[in-house]
Image (cartoon, rainbow, N blue to C red):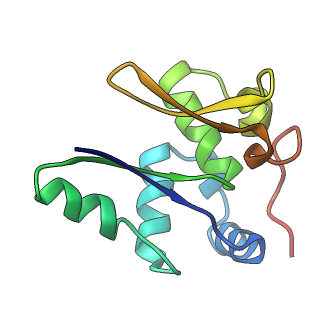
Amino acid sequence: MRILVLNADYPRFLGWFYRRQPGLENTSYAAQMAARNASLFGVADFYSRNFAILGHQAAEIHVNNPWLQSAWAHTRHGNRSTGAAGWLRTSGTSTLAATRGETVEAAAAAAGPQGRPQPQA
């Protein structure tokens, strides 16, 4: 079975999280995801990790974290210049994840504003 877990963080949490770890927004997808999961705020990789233990293919997407999405895009496509929201926004839909060549699409509204926002107070 393939399972996709969609997570959304409170915007205030995201601001606090990235301000607390200066430069994290410029690190790799793996480093950002590890830091996000280690925070244990609301969710972590509990679902996907345990589904994988049970033999299922599972992935998690943080739908409103532009820094994490940008890092993922950079890992997959080698480009961060437009920021996560700019890369994701395409004709009303956005590609959020790809697994073995299959894509999962969601409304572009999940991508947020154009550009790459900075963590704010």
Of residue 99 and residue 1, the one placed in the foreground of this image is 1
Does residue 79 lie above or below 97 as drawn?
above
Residue at (80% x, 28% y) in the render: 92
Does residue 85 lie above or below 78 as drawn?
below
Position of residue 102 in the picture relative to residue 20 (left or right): left
Residue 9 in percent (x, y) is at: 64, 69
Does residue 18 lie above or below 114 as drawn?
below
In which quarter of the view is residue 71 placed? top right
Residue at (86% x, 68% y) in the render: 120
Residue 87 in percent (x, y) is at: 73, 27
Position of residue 6 in the picture relative to residue 52 (left or right): right
Residue at (80% x, 21% y) in the render: 91
Of residue 66 and residue 53, the one placed in the foreground of this image is 53
Position of residue 103 in the picture relative to residue 66 (left or right): left
Residue at (11% x, 58% y) in the render: 54
Residue 19 in percent (x, y) is at: 72, 71
Position of residue 36 in the picture relative to residue 86 (left or right): left
Does residue 35 lie above or below 52 as drawn?
below
Residue 95 in percent (x, y) is at: 61, 30
What is the count of numbered marks?
0
Question: Looking at the figure, which quarter contains the N terminus?
Answer: top left
Question: Looking at the figure, which quarter contains the C terminus?
Answer: bottom right
